[in-house]
Image (cartoon, rainbow, N blue to C red):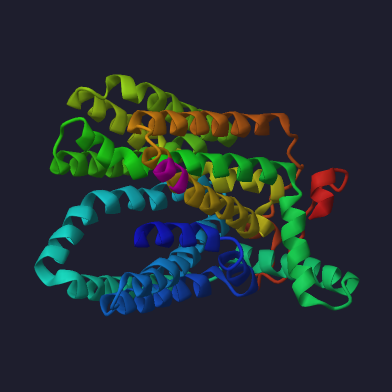
Amino acid sequence: MVYLMHLSTKYINRSPVSSIVTDRFSCRVAIVLSGIFFIIGYLGTAFATNVRVAILTCGIIGGIGAGLGCNASLVVIGFNFDKRRDLALGISLSGVGTGVFVLAPLMQATRDYYGSIGFFVILAAMSANIVTCGMLCFPSQMERHAKSERNRDRLRSKLSSNNNHFFAVIRTYVSVLANRGVILMCSSFFIYSIGSFLVYLHLPHYIESKGHSGAQAAFLVALIGIISAVSRILTGLVANTHRIDNVIIYSVSIAIFGSATLVYPFIADNYSGHVIYVCFVGLFYGCCYVVSAGVHVNFVGINYISSAVGLQFFCGGAGGIIGPVFAGVLVDQGGTYNQSIIVAACCLLISSILGAVLLCIPKPAIIKDAPSDKCKTDGDECETTFDLNDDDNKRL
């Protein structure tokens, strides 16, 4: 329950809080605040007297920290890389899979040796490194220019809203959300999160229900992590060639993940079937995360990438809440794990179809706004050209 609240708060927080902090201040501030929230949350959990307190400290406070850091760490890469942005995202996101593979058994050993209090104190100490890493994320020229462009647009919106800053911020989000590409990405990721959370929630129990041990189930989950680390780097390499549209990578990877999930119940009687499935999950589960930012850049430009990514993961958080709750109700009402897995597969395939529809939406003709060619050294002024004849671009 605490972990579910932590994960859901993480995704939901990535839009209203993280994007506002990133846009108002910088990615650097958001990442540093992320580390501080983690420290407070884990230290509070170490001395929590009951589950309700743990839900507040680890679930909500720690989830806010996760949301701040995850969104800003993706956006800061977009602001520092232009030609090799997808590759940089793939390399950075590979750390998620590596962490699952390496830290999962290490953290279990730490908890067994030091107990719950020592475990969360050590997590708080490790989280302090996020503050150090965040301090190194100095705003780039592209980030400073994007901020000045947003401030300019917000000033116009503020003047038309009778100097109300709150409504100016809301109008910014509404303008981004009104973009058809962002709407489809949010809808696709909402359904994708329902399916993927269903898989992750029931996978260890499903493996054990087939007669395998908990250690074997834990190994397979860890195997997903290490395969996913390699897969995300390879996805970044493929996307960086620009020979395949990011939308195709996004949609096809989810389709393969969904197809493998649909077949999974029919091959799950043997351990080899579980191994084959987790290999497919590891290869294709994280691909959509690598190319999501690149897809949004095509529709809203780099200036509003934080808002677009934040809205997408906000919808993912909502799906992450609905998915496990639905799965629990399904099993409690006499359903089976097989039925839960099939429902997850259907959600993933629907998400893939919604992603593929993005190919039918014309992209705004946004000329590169890389500061290396057009921006002055201080990053405050930059010549950026937009195709103002495009309806979606007019909104921004």
Would you say 48 lies left or right of 394 here? left
- Identify whether 359 is placed above or below 23: above
Q: Start and end of the magenta stretch? A: 325-329
Question: Percent x, y for residue 292?
Answer: 55, 45
Quarter in which the C terminus is drawn: bottom right
So how many labels did they put on this image? 0
| Quarter where residue 150 is shown | bottom right
Would you say 22 lies left or right of 126 here? right
For image coordinates 29% across by 44% down, the residue present is: 225
Quarter in which the N terminus is drawn: bottom left
Question: Percent x, y for residue 241?
Answer: 51, 35
In front here: 157 or 41?
41
In front here: 351 or 231?
351
Using the rendered image of the protein, determine whether residue 286 is visible from the camera's viewpoint.
no
Question: Percent x, y for residue 389?
Answer: 88, 44
Decide whether the magenta segment is chiefly helix, strand or loop. helix
Would you say 89 lies left or right of 248 here? left
For image coordinates 77% across by 76% down, the residue present is: 165
